[in-house]
Amino acid sequence: MEVLVMVTTESSKSNALQMAKLLIQNKLAACVSIKQIFSIYKWNNDIEETKEFEITIKSKLEFKDFLIEFLNKNSTYDVPQIISKKYHAEMKYYNWINKTI
């Protein structure tokens, strides 16, 4: 049984928490994990170094397009990181996700 795992980032813990709560409230995710990371990337021809918060979203495969739309609309970034992959899930976890959202 396959589930969707989507990863995005936010610039602050409060933004990440708000995003996570909205995803759960709108039943777009069964679980959202947040961890602090340090990113180095190129933006407007400058190399940026910054603290960010990585948001990992566990959801249903069929919610992928809704999640992309939601993240594009609600992200504080001009170009939000939105990457996803489908994973095989153990049956109990798969059933929990499908029962939760």
Image: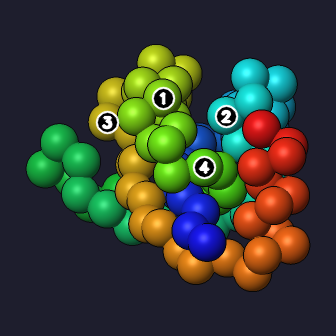
User: Vertical placement of 47 versus 21: above or below?
Assistant: below
Q: Position of residue 4 (x, y in %)?
A: 55, 59
Q: Earlier in the sequence, mark 4 or mark 1?
A: 4
Question: In the rendered image, which residue does mark 2 sit on?
Answer: 28
Task: Mark 3 vs mark 2: give the one in front.
Answer: 2
Residue placed most toward the observer, 71 or 97: 97
Q: Cβ–Cβ below 8 Å for labels 1 and 2?
A: yes
Give the spatial CA distance, label 1 vs label 2: 8 Å
Q: Earlier in the sequence, mark 2 or mark 4?
A: 2
Question: What residue is at 40 percent from the left and 48 percent from the top?
Answer: 82
Q: Secondary structure at mark 3?
A: loop
Give the spatial CA distance, label 4 vs label 3: 24 Å
**The disc labelled 2 sits on which kind of residue?**
Leu
Residue 66, which numbered label? 1
**The disc labelled 1 sits on which kind of residue?**
Phe
Question: What residue is at 78 percent from the left and 54 percent from the top?
Answer: 97
Which image quadrant: the N terminus? Answer: bottom right
Question: In the rendered image, which residue does mark 3 sit on?
Answer: 79
Task: Mark 1 vs mark 3: give the one in front.
Answer: 1
Give the spatial CA distance, label 2 vs label 4: 8 Å
Quadrant of the image occupied by residue 65: top left
Left/right placement of residue 57 relative to residue 35 reads left
Q: Position of residue 46 (x, y in %)?
A: 21, 53
Question: What residue is at 74 percent from the left and 22 percent from the top?
Answer: 26
Q: Secondary structure at mark 4?
A: loop
Q: Residues within 10 Å of mark 3 (few under 14, many from 20)?
A: few
Task: Mark 2 vs mark 4: give the one in front.
Answer: 4
Q: What colour scheme was applied to this rendering of the protein? A: rainbow
